[in-house]
Amino acid sequence: MGEWQRVGPAGNRAYLAVPAGSTGPGVLVLHAWWGLTPVLTDVCDRLAAAGFVALAPSLYPGGATAATIAEAEALRDGWDEEAEVEPVVLAATDMLRGLPAATGAPIGVVGFSMGAYWALHLSRVRPDDVAAVVAVYGTDDGDYGTARAAYLGHFAEHDDYEPPEAVGALETRIRAAGREVTFHVYPGTGHWFVEPNRPEYDATAADLVWDRTLTFLKEQLAGTSTDGDRMDLLDRLLEHDRWATTTLLDLTRPLPDAQLDQPFDVGHRTLRETFHHAIFNVEFWTGLMTEQPVGAEPDAGSIATLIDHHERSHAAFATFARRIRDEHRLDDTFVDHYGYPMTFGGAILHVLLHDAEHRSEALHILARLGVPDLPEVDHGLWDFKRRGF
């Protein structure tokens, strides 16, 4: 999908991936200390498949890469990072914004570890160029008073490179500058947990990172396409589904157990079990389609547990659904739990409609419990919110 370019005063290698529709919002991708490896070019290809124009420059002269920590440390110690990286990052920003395929401005930036530092730095020194920053286990210690971007952070629970104190301090500085910021910490993970070639890789957490990142970039860069919003129908259905269920789950947080477990003649009788069934159904069908069947349905647990289960199961489902779409396999079949062939497209639609049915039941229960100011969670309201109305 991609092609190689040259960027910066020393002609560093850069990988450019353009969506099938030929145009889309620009996203700069900045690598970790491993260099511009296939892991990062794959990130660009996946961004292009989602409708973005993605450019990843090599921050090392000559396109050097490392496979081990010792090799990466040698690369890091063998160059002047502060002097050599900034010219490359700035040149790549100019190149991306100048591409005919990159519609509108400003751009998004996704950085991993060392690249996250430079993504954050770029948003401060080029505030008019950067609308959205995704920092994946990386921080800096800068002043965000001039920044104009929104920020999304993904961090490991156990990370010697980015301790919780550094993550918390960064979030505080960004928030104090009046910028939109959301940081997520992924339980049980370590540094590099999104990179599939590393032993720290956590597939479930990585899927959730990807789902949250795509949602964030599409929301923040929605107005940058001169051809209008390029989000396709499946993206709209998936993102509305996640938002609508999350919105209703958030409404249940203050409810006592007595109300969560009060029986009604609708849905799965109680609010807790209705949500639990809908969330487990997403995981169940994802397991069927990926040939990784899940076990018996667990206990519902607390609302916080259900929210975490929802985000993780929906991220895995959405990632799989988009991959099937991108591979043009929606009409391919798999064997369902009754032993019958079913198309992937039909199963994906079943999951989405099943979710909508149980959201309707949950709204009915919430109303009977006397919860005030219940929102409409239809697609129209989601679309208005997504576009900033």
Image (cartoon, rainbow, N blue to C red):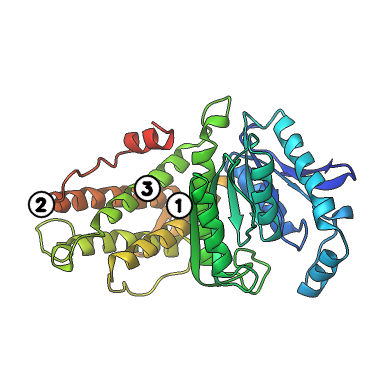
Regarding mark 2 in the picture, which secondary structure is present there? Answer: helix
Q: Mark 1 points at which residue?
A: 344
How many numbered marks have been drawn onto this rendered protein structure?
3
Residue 197 placement, left or right of 324: right
Regarding mark 1 in the picture, which secondary structure is present there? Answer: helix
Q: Judge the density around disc 3: few (<14), some (14-19), many (≥20) Cα neighbours within 10 Å.
A: some
Q: Is residue 285 above or below residue 144?
A: below
Q: In this view, does 371 lie above or below 196?
A: above
Q: Judge the density around disc 1: few (<14), some (14-19), many (≥20) Cα neighbours within 10 Å.
A: many
Q: Name the residue under label 2.
A: 368
Q: Is residue 113 above or below residue 347?
A: below
How far apart, in angstroms, are the residues tagged by discs 3 and 1? 22 Å
The disc label shown at residue 243, or none: 3
Kind of residue at disc 1: Phe
Closer to the camera in the image, 178 or 256: 178
How far apart, in angstroms, are the residues tagged by discs 1 and 2? 37 Å
Pointer 3 or 2: first along the chain: 3
Pointer 3 or 1: first along the chain: 3
- Residue 68 location, quadrant: bottom right
Answer yes or no: do the residues labelled 1 and 2 have beta carbons within 8 Å? no
Residue 226 placement, left or right of 310: right
